[in-house]
Amino acid sequence: MSRRKDNYETSRWRQFMQWLAGEIDPLTAAKVGMIQEKAETLPDEKMERGKVSTLQATPGNESDEREAHSAAAQAEKAAGQAKSAMAAEPWLNQPSGESRGLRLYRRFYQVMSILLCMGIISVLLWTIAYLPIFGNAGNPDNNEVSARYIEKGLDETGAVNMVTGMILDYRAFDTFGESCVLFIASCCVLVLLRIDNDGGSESWKKRQTEANDRIFEPKNDIILQKCACVLVPVILVFGIYIILNGHLSPGGGFSGGAVLGSGLILYLNAFGFQKAERIFNGKIYQRITVSALTFYCLAKSYSFFTGANHLNSGIPLGTPGNILSSGLILPLNICVGLVVACTMYAFYTLFRKGGM
Amino acid sequence: MLVQNFPFFSIVLAMFSGILSSVLNGKQARNVSLGVIGSTIIMSAAVFFWCLGNGESYTYMMGHFPAPWGNEIRAGVLEGLTALLFSVIMLLSVLGGMRHTFEDVEPSKVNLFFIMIDLMLSSLLALIYTNDLFTAYVFVEINTIAGCGLIMIRQKGRSFSAAIRYMIMSQLGSGLFLIGLTLLYDVTGHLLMSPAKETVASIEAAGRYEIPMLVILAVISVGLAIKSGLYPFHSWIPYTYGYATPTASAILSGLVSKGYIFLLMKIFYRVLGQENVIASRMVNVLFLFGLAGMIMGSVHAILEEDTRRMIAYSSVAQIGYIYMGIGLGTESGMVAAVFHMFTHSATKALLFISAVGLYEVSGEKKDFRSLRGAGYRNRLAGVGFTVGALSMVGFPMLSGFISKLLFATSALQSPHKMMLTLIGLAVSTVLNAIYFLRLVITLYGRAEQVAVKGKQRCSFVFGGAIVCFILLNLFLGLMSQPVVRAITEGLEMFD
Amino acid sequence: MASHLLYNIEETVAMILFGIGFTMLLLHRNLIRKIMGMNIMDTAVYLFLAAKGYIKGRMVPIVTDGILDASAYMNPVPSGLVLTGIVVSVSTTALMLALTIRLYERYHSLDLDQILIQVKKEEGS
Amino acid sequence: MNQILLCVPALLPLAGVMALLISGIFGSRRETDSGKDLMEKYLFWYVAALTLANSLVLWRLILWSGEGESLVLFRLYGELKVMFCLDKMGKVFAGVISVLWPLAVLYSFEYMKGEKRKYTFFSYYLMTYGVTAGIALSGNLMTLYLFYELLTLATFPLVLFPMTKDALKASRRYLYYSIGGAAFAFLGLVFVLTFSITGNTAFLPGGILDLGRANSRRNTLLFIYLLAFFGFGVKAVVFPCHRWLPLATVAPTPVTALLHAVAVVKSGAFAILRLTYFSFGTEFLLGSWAQWTVMAASMVTILYGSTMAVREAHWKRRLAYSTISNLSYILLAASMMSSLGLAASLCHMVVHAFMKICSFFCAGAVMHQTGKTYIYELDGLGRKMPITFGCLTVASLSLIGIPMFAGFISKWNIAGAAFACGMEGLERFGSWGLLPFGAVAVLLYSALMTAVYMLTVVIRGYFPQISRQAGGDLSRPGARQNTPDIRQGNLDPGWRMLLPLVIFAAVIIGVGLHSQPLTEFLMVIGGEGA
Amino acid sequence: MKGNMILLLPVVLPVLMGAIALGGKGFRGNRPLLLGVVFTGLAGGLLSTLLAVTGEAKLRLWQLTESVEIGFQLDGVGRFFAVLTVVVWFLAGLYSVTYMTHEEDESRFFGFYLIVLGVLIGLDFSGNLITFYVFYEMMTLTSLPLVLHERSKEAVSAGLKYLFYSVAGAFLALFGIFFFTAVLGDLTFVPGGVAEAASFRGKEGVLLTAVFCMVVGFGAKAGMFPLHGWLPTAHPVAPAPASAVLSGVITKSGVLALIRVVFFIVGPEQIRGTWVQQAWIFLSLLTVFMGSMLAYKEPVMKKRLAYSTVSQVSYILFGLSLLEPTAFVGALSHVVFHSLVKNALFLTAGAVIFQTGWRKVEQMRGLGRVMPVTLGCYTAASLSLVGIPPASGFISKWYLAQGALSSGCGAWTWIGPVILLTSALLTAGYLLPLTINGFFPGGDFDGRELEERKLLGKEPSWQMLLPVLLLSAGAVIFGCFPGPLLRMLSEIAETVL
């Protein structure tokens, strides 16, 4: 630790440790070198190479430059290409052994990735070779748990769809958690992408224009609008149907919500932000989400509390098969549906322009 | 008993406050958060003492359906204690980094930050209390996302790259955990821990599914190890801990990884069966990784110039300690691991918070040399950092000493690993001393530059948080006996 | 044992997909592909779960004709888990994509190594 | 009452320091120039009073505390208690520090005159007193370990005190070494606790290991003993762990003298004695490879330390190297694992404390009065500072081991112990028994080297080389040159520095001439301990 | 403290006087007063010694530790050495009255001169090995200022060399002392040795090593190879009286030490025929030969004498190493003769330096014309040292050779005498050329230079001349009438062998 800082920064040990730590790899170190020496012309290259101090920087500059060009071009196209495809071509033509280390490293990397992949797959396959046979009724997972869900589910939850009954009543806590995952993910996306007006500062305006891709959006595309006019209501109604029938047929809050959300997104695409924001904006989103989740939370808490304390929840289960049945499942499905729909829509708007 | 509802209350309350905070402004959200954390402390304490008093643990139905069918949570002495300590540390971390939170986060997004905090708390509590594997998975994900949110809430390029690294590694871990879970479900047909354990026991007794069980164990362990940053999978740690806002750093390093470790222990004890785990070679792998982490983490930290990354690397080392304790495969090793979990949570959070206090009087430079003399400019933070560093080094009367002691004594019970453990402990202590005390000396060296702009007086809240952290450390160091007894009792209740 | 793999073809495929997804997430340098890998990985798990829930010759677990017999329906549990899992993976995908967008805005690259280099340069300056 | 008194020497200075530090924090803002002198005066009286009081309490304990009285302050964990107990060996150490400290404080008041950060200095100085007293009074290994660690903390600000680059480096290294050493010592603590026959770590003469259990894992335990030995050996500057000490001489002389010649290093040696004789026990260690290793390590250290001291031109560093070799005398004696060995090592511990502090204080006096730090600058100072150099001569002769001075007594005892060990060893352990004879040889080599490095200083002081003109005919009767009158100006420091010096020199001579009571007392301890 | 207090007197008196001379401020510039003190000390020492040696006495002074006792006792060897010491000291002191006028810091010189005398007498009177060791160390330290008196660069480095060789030797010897204390406990001198073979059973190897260490260690003071290096460096730089006593007396303390160890502690029987004896003989013979050869080559007068000392003292050691009564007598008689002769020679050399400033032998051509009496004394002393029959050296060498022949030490019985003879020849070769060149400078010698410097017939003052005369006369007279001395020595030899 008495080592001097300057020595230490350039020492091989440090580089090795950084490499171990994943901070750099020989490749990236070469790139750092590349950026510094971009200005160098080719005839000087050999001399310059002698000066390059680090081990990793030695694999020639030319290849780096080419790579840099290709990388820049790709960045402009905003398309991430596979690095192997990007990297392999120019180097195969490399006459000398300059890029050898680099090329070897790449090869090594590729081979190692494939080997790792194979390794994981083989371990897992080895495992499942010992697992129960597919589709066999005697498998361990077909035990008293699923039996009770099937046999008593109707009585206990009132839901005809056993899956819904399971996720919203037997294992409702998981599902609540899952809604929270969605909620917190949307919060994170908000943090990342929402552009708040902080008083019209320069940075805000810059981000605003950067994020705004409305120039690409189809403006008053009549075909789209007409189609949307027809489709959006159908989609919305379908989504509502799925939500409301969640306890009766395949579907439920999540799937229905997704359908609803896609309807809204179609509407937005067809008619633009201004119109869409008239019916749905950030405030509404917030209110709907919060009230839905609050209701969900309170309802389920009530149910958990009563259940845990062996109290009667007092919620009627109704007649199985009816729309208004199976106790809390229907309202919960509605809540979940709303949350999911709002979140989907919010994701979309946030991704596109950073706000609603 | 009302007390028995408290675990459930605390989880739901935290979630609810998170939901509610999305319509509040920053200050309100903060108050709500603090209130929730405070009440969680009280409730966890109540649960802990109730369980301790009754000498029993209990399961709590989440709904109207009993064990194999409905979700359940479970509370016992260890859960109560862990929840208590975690919420205390969380409260102190939030308080300690408060001003920085408001500085680092865009004003309109402060409430989102507190949503993250709330949900982080709830997910941690859920991980602690859960008695259901799939619930655990869901809350692991909440935890991950909340953690990611905490990292990138400080909107800088670095924190984004840190967050994406964190997410990638976490997703790898989650994926492995999930596949392990499904395999386990496939083999046992149960998602709740207690019935799953019975099935596992019968499977083991019948000698079936040996290879799947081994792979399940490996996959789950590795998955959670990746998420908690065990040595070979640690590369994300310095980025995430190093660049986040102080509260986030403190919480991430102090609590998040510990939540996963706690979950792993719980799975070992309550699902796979500790004796099966020991019988398989997996403990040895964890032991070796832990040992390697202890040494390599410290070596990295020594080579590091940036203070916060240094502390982050120290976390790698300390997590190595914990896994080493688990890997010893003895009851006392596990006790030591749990105790070190507490120690490390308390100490690492203290270190991060006090490091921030030192930074702000030294011009916010990263290089640790810029901190020269900072110990005089912000005395409390200096003292806090010193205490934390000494605790990490294993100074008697501080918590680190007790965990070191526990590790060493437990190492004596497993003869094959004894020498390695002891030498590892000693070497690691030396290495710890090297980088921590280098910092401490720097803090009290003669300042070359004059104190940087104002703010020399640390705020009352910050000071209070530091003092509480120090007291917590002292408590764990001096009054460790009841804590250890409680841990032992709690671990016994696990079976 | 190899024959077992053929019987369990769905599971075999799921595991191969998992391996591919895992490797992509771990080792690929392009962020979008990483996210794709993550999705493949998750999907593989759902496929595996779905395969686990299937029982030959039984109905989907929705009560039809009032039959309440365990031997008539498939296992509902894996379906529920898949449902939950999908939402989780949607959330994480959204989050990762959002992060990618921010990173791309800032560094104009999707290559994680490039991004890290630039981050480093930023720190240095 | 007596029991409670046991914790006073350790805690009183700590409490006093707390008060001082707090008053320093609050007082520093109000401090004005006029008030400063007054404050300094108060500081002097405060520190002096506290030190004296503490010494008095210690002597009260030494003289009138019964055997077996102990005080458990609190329980750290399980059977790990913080316990104070003053047995005979503790009395020896306590006696030494209680005599040395007040004098050192007196000395440092003169030495530190004009220093700005007196508060800091004296706070930590006092604190170290408390901690060292704690080491002397500790009743079990745990307490010893605790205070051992605390000692590191209390002394490192003192090493750092000059705040120069060197000081930073030195204090850093000091910390690394000490904490690292403690890490290994810790392993010893754990093992002692586990294999203890009493279930705790309380010191008992003859050790507390459960021999039945211990023998089943003998080699492991021996290895751990070695680790712990080298761990504590860091403070006792055993060879591979010695490098912090010469660097640490950057500290002000009172610190170097008291801490790095007496308190710190002796604490290390004391801890090793406790570990060897009162925890592991000689019965377990005698004749084992661990014993020979320890012995060899001390021998190497002696050789190394004394040779390096000769090479070193910086006075204080030279003394530091001398400390290295002398500390290993103690360890060497201890490694004989016999009652004679224990007595001899304690004897050297006591005697060396006086000799080394005297030499350091002389060096400090010269530094303080003339600013000279290198040996080659000292020409002719013997005439200008007669008292200082007189004391230095006494200390030097004693360090060499010239009869009639105290150093001879301890070396005599060490050699006696070594021979006894060798005789027994030859009979019982074959050729290993030759090692103690080698130890004596090493001892003598070191004595020779001591003569070289100490006497060169003295001779330079008294016999400055006269640079005669080249080619001047020396033999011609009339060719005498008038040497400059080197007696001009008496540079001896003030009484506060001289008094300790004279007292130490007197003690050295006194012990050298009449050591029987001391050695008899030590033999009693040795008889108990092994 | 019990026993005859008179034994303390010759020790304390010179030390006290020396301390007064050293510490008293009034002596600077007041030479008569200083000399008064000095001669009080010297005479007091002389008289009290003579008084003390007449009686049989023991004195236990006090215990340093339980096992370490400071005690005095008188026996034949002690008396012998004490008388020799004090006489030589007195004469050299007389000489230095004049000589020291050309040195500085007389008070220091005289102070330490006296102190060393006290210490030496203490050494001679020591009753046990510990006490002996104590005085031995003190002798080294107190004689050091005499060596570095000039404070020139050479003097200081020579002084340090002297110090370190002596201390190294002492510590080597201390190893043996430690050993014997550990084995025997009590180390009071007993003629014939206190050690019994039984107590060393099983530790013969260590015993012999210890003895060997002591031989080599104490041999350092006696200038025995391999620790002889200090002698030719230290003696020449000291003032002449100091070199005289260093060479003549202090080297003999090494001899005394070996006598004490071998004949009074270990006992000759323990080492007879062992490798230690062989090694001892070998070392001493080697030193004899080597010293002579080096002296032969040496151009500087005092250095040449110093090498001669190396060689001659090893004659004594050779005599002791044979462990044979005749050789023992020869050795002890050589102690006397060599003391006298070497003192005479050094004082002569000092006188030459004092009067002419000549230091090298080749400068001294024609010395006979400058100071014939002095050179005459020199010649007498030289002849005695060479061993020309009537003079004393012959007696001792005769006994030594005889002892060697009858010792039965294998090859040494004839190698020893051969080397002695060779060395005697060499002695003649390095001492007598001065006489020849001095008195017979040869035809080409030009005496004008002497005249120019007004050196002709420039004898030194009586204070310087008298001791030289007395000493060389003693050397010759003892050779002519060796009877009483030899009788006394034989008695001693009988008691110890």
Image (cartoon, rainbow, N blue to C red):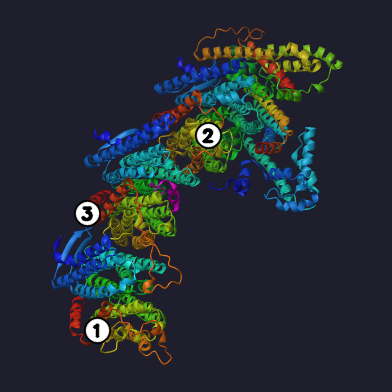
Residue A354 in magenta?
Answer: no
D243 magenta-colored:
yes
C-beta proximity under 8 Å, tags 2 and 3: no
C100 shown above or below E101: above
Chain of the residue that carries numbered disc 1 in the rendered image: E
**Cα–Cα gap, marks 1 and 3:** 51 Å
Q: Secondary structure at mark 3?
A: helix
Residue toward you, D247 or E84 = E84
Chain under disc 2: B
The amino acid beneath tag 2 is Glu
Q: Is residue C116 left or right of residue D25?
A: right
Label 3 belongs to which residue? Answer: D516
**Residue B22, can we see it?**
yes
Q: Residue furthest bottom?
A: E443
Q: Which residues are magenta?
A: D233-253
Q: Amino acid at mark 1?
A: Ala
Look at mark 2 in the image and give the residue it sits on.
B204
Q: Residue at x 42, y 40 (%)?
A: D153
Q: CA distance from mark 2 to mark 3?
A: 75 Å
CA neighbours of label 2 inside 10 A, class few (<14), some (14 to 19), many (20+): some
- Of tags 2 and 1, the one toward the viewer is 1
Q: Quadrant of residue E452?
A: bottom left
Residue B128 percent coordinates (x, y): 52, 25
Amino acid type at circle 3 is Gln
**Residue at mark 1:** E473
Q: Chain of mark 3?
A: D
Location of residue A298 in the rendering, given as x and y in whole percent from the top left corner? 57, 12
